[in-house]
Every structure is written in C-alpha cells, then in structure tokens.
Image: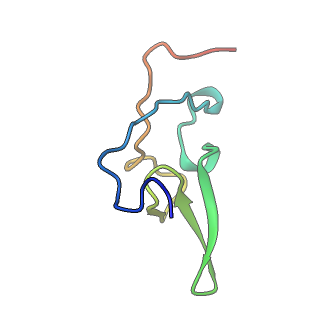
Amino acid sequence: MGRFDKGVGHYTVALVPIRFPENEVYCRYCPMLKLRLIDGEAAAICGSTGEIIKNVDKPDDCPAVIQEGGNET
C-alpha cells in the first residue's frame, strides 16, 4: 500500500497566512471554505477542521489565529 499502511504516528502542523479583506474575518471570505452537497443540500465546510459551518458570517468557531498588526496592503 504505502508507507502509512500501519497508520500515522503523528502529524506535522504547518501555519499558512490567510488573508481576509479589511479585518472582515468571516468564513465567507476564507479561501479554505469548501462547499459540498450533503444529503442533497449545499453545506459550507471548514477546510481546516472539516466541520460544517452553519453561519459563514459568524467567526466564533474559526480555528484561524489572527496575527496582531498583521495588516498588509
């Protein structure tokens, strides 16, 4: 099969910058947001956690860590 046929011992976590427009940190603007059909209905899925996002305009459960002074033009 492959080198992970007996499972994975650990994962390495990488941090990548996600740019949101003008401090609008909402799932709606996240490039990791995925749309999938679940039981024939469109659902928003977090590309980081795999969780279903019920409200793309409510950032309460977002796993993104906002960098202080991280604004760029």
Pick whichever, 24 or 9, lies toward us. 9
Q: Is residue 11 left or right of residue 29?
A: left
Query: For residue 22, what is the image quadrant?
Result: top right
Identify the residue at image location x=64%, y=44%: 31
**Whether residue 64 is situated above or below residue 40 in the rendered picture:** above
Tell me where residue 45 appears, x and y as whole percent. 54, 61
- In the image, residue 59 lies at what x, y percent? 45, 46
**In the rendered image of this protein, does residue 62 appear above or below residue 70?**
below
What's the residue at 34%, 59% (across, down)? Answer: 7
Q: Quick one: which residue is furthest to the bottom in this view? A: 39
Q: Which residue is drawn at 48% across and 12% down?
A: 69
Colouring: rainbow
Q: Position of residue 52 (x, y in %)?
A: 47, 65
Quadrant where the C terminus is found in the figure: top right
Q: Which residue lies furthest to the left in this view?
A: 9
Q: Residue at x 41, y 31 (%)?
A: 65
As displayed, is residue 44 above or below residue 33?
below
Question: Number of numbered discs present?
Answer: 0
